C-alpha cells in the first residue's frame, strides 16, 4: 500500500510523557536494515514554538507505524531559511548496540542462555527460534556489543540470522520469513513502478579461499568458494577460527563457509526507488522485471523512506536471497 506525505503523523513525547504533535517536516528519512536491531530516523521540522526536551518519537502512515524510537539528538537552528528543529532518533533496539557485552568464555551454553544473559535484561522477553542450539565453548571478546554477542552465537551455531521483527520479538531462523512479495516493472500496468534503478555487480566482494590455522598453529588446510573458477577471481584470506570451532580438527571450515557466504551476499546489490511511501519490511521479497532482465525472490535488506523537495520516496536495497 502507498501513502502520500499528507497522511503522515509525527508525535513526540516530552520528559513527562506528554504528547507533542509535530508539524509536517521539511525533510525526513527513516532507514530500516535487516542486519541491525536499530532503525534510524532523521527529521527537520519548522519551529514556530519553543519545544521542551523530547525523548521519544513515533511516525504513522495512516494506521501503520513506520517508526518508533528514542531521540538521540535534538537541535534548533535559525538562519535565513527560518527557525528549524532537527531530531535524530533510533528504535529501541539501539540499546543492544550501545551496551558492550561482558568479555567471557562460556562453557556448554545454549542460545536461550545467551538470550537471557545479553538480550532479556534490556526489555526483550520473546525469543522466537526453531531450535535451541548450543556450543561447548563460546567466547565473547572485549568490544563486542550485546547484540553482536547474541547474533554471532546464533549465526555460528545454526548458520542463520537473528533479527528483531516489527512486534519487537527477537527472531532466530535458519530460513528468513518471506513476508510480502512485491512485483516491480515499468512495463506491467498492475506492477509497482519505479523511478530509479541501479544494479551493481560488486566483484570486490567475494572471498575465494580461506587458508585456516589448525590447533597446532599451522595454516594447514583451506576452504574454497565453489564459484572461484566461474567468477575468475582470486582473493585469499588467512583465518584463525573462532574458539567455538577449535574443538575439532577441521572446525575452521564451518567458520570459513559462513564467511564466504557473507562475502557473496554483497556481490549483487540492487537499489530501486518508487514514488510515495510503499510500506515494506525487511525480509520482504521482490520480483523485478527491468525489460532486459528478470530477477526473482530478491531479499529486501534495507528500506529507506525519504521526504525531500521532490516529495516522498521509498528506496529498497535488494540482495540475492541464496546467500542471506
Image (spheres, rainbow, N blue to C red):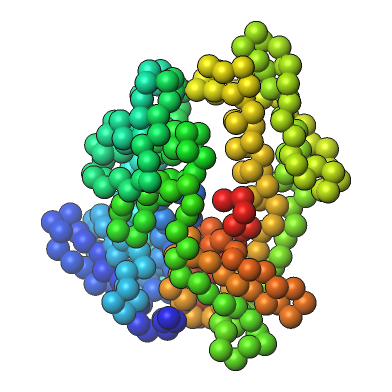
Does residue 59 lie above or below 36 as drawn?
below
Quadrant for the N terminus in the image = bottom left
Q: Is residue 196 left or right of residue 160?
A: right
Q: Is residue 243 left or right of residue 44?
A: right
Q: Position of residue 206 (x, y in %)?
A: 73, 44
The residue at the far bottom in this view is 189
Image quadrant of residue 213? top right
Residue lying at 44% horizontally and 81% vertically, measured from the top left: 2
Residue lying at 38% horizontally and 46% vertically, measured from the top left: 130
Using the rendered image of the protein, determine whether residue 205 is visible from the camera's viewpoint.
Answer: yes
Image quadrant of residue 89? bottom left
The residue at the far top in this view is 216
Q: Position of residue 273 (x, y in %)?
A: 59, 73
Along the viewing direction, whichever of 259 and 220 lies nearer the viewer: 220
Does residue 269 lie above or below 210 as drawn?
below
Does residue 262 lie above or below 152 as drawn?
below
Q: Is residue 244 left or right of residue 221?
A: left
Residue lying at 49% horizontally and 80% vertically, measured from the top left: 276
Using the rendered image of the protein, determine whether residue 73 is visible from the camera's viewpoint.
Answer: no
Along the viewing direction, whichever of 20 and 160 lies nearer the viewer: 160
Q: Position of residue 250 (x, y in %)?
A: 63, 21
Does residue 11 lie above or below 154 as drawn?
below
Q: Position of residue 257 (x, y in %)?
A: 64, 36
Image quadrant of residue 65? bottom left
Q: How many marks?
A: 0
Residue lying at 59% horizontally and 23% vertically, measured from the top left: 251
Amino acid at each position: 500500500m502507498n501513502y502520500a506525505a499528507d497522511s503522515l503523523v509525527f508525535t513526540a513525547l516530552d520528559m513527562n510523557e506528554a504528547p507533542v504533535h509535530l508539524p509536517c517536516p521539511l525533510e525526513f528519512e527513516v532507514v530500516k536494515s535487516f542486519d541491525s536491531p536499530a532503525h534510524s530516523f532523521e527529521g527537520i521540522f519548522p519551529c514556530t514554538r519553543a519545544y521542551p526536551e523530547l525523548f521519544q518519537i513515533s511516525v504513522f502512515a495512516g494506521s501503520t507505524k513506520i517508526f518508533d524510537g528514542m531521540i538521540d539528538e535534538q537541535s534548533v537552528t535559525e538562519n535565513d531559511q527560518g527557525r528549524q528543529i532537527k531530531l535524530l532518533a533510533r528504535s529501541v533496539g539501539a540499546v543492544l548496540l550501545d551496551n558492550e557485552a561482558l568479555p567471557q568464555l562460556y562453557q556448554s551454553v545454549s542460545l536461550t542462555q545467551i538470550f537471557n544473559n545479553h538480550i532479556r535484561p534490556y526489555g526483550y522477553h520473546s525469543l522466537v527460534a526453531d531450535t535451541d542450539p548450543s556450543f561447548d565453548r563460546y567466547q565473547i571478546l572485549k568490544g563486542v556489543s550485546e547484540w553482536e554477542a547474541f547474533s554471532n552465537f546464533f549465526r555460528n551455531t545454526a548458520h542463520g540470522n537473528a533479527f528483531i521483527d516489527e512486534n519487537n520479538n527477537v527472531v532466530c531462523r535458519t530460513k528468513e520469513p518471506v513476508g510480502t512479495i512485491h512485483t516491480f516493472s515499468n512495463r506491467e500496468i498492475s506492477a509497482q513502478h519505479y523511478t530509479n534503478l541501479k544494479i551493481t555487480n560488486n566483484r570486490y566482494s567475494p572471498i575465494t579461499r580461506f587458508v585456516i590455522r589448525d590447533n597446532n598453529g599451522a595454516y594447514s588446510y583451506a576452504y574454497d568458494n565453489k564459484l572461484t573458477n566461474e567468477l575468475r577471481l582470486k582473493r585469499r584470506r588467512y583465518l584463525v577460527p573462532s574458539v567455538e570451532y577449535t574443538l575439532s580438527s577441521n572446525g575452521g571450515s564451518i567458520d570459513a563457509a559462513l564467511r564466504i557466504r557473507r562475502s557473496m551476499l554483497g556481490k549483487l546489490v540492487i537499489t530501486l526507488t518508487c514514488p510515495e511511501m510503499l510500506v515494506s519490511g525487511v525480509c520482504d521479497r521482490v520480483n523485478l522485471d527491468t525489460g532486459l532482465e528478470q530477477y526473482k525472490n530478491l531479499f529486501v535488506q534495507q528500506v529507506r523512506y525519504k521526504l525531500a523537495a521532490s516529495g516522498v520516496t521509498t528506496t529498497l536495497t535488494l540482495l540475492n536471497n541464496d546467500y542471506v
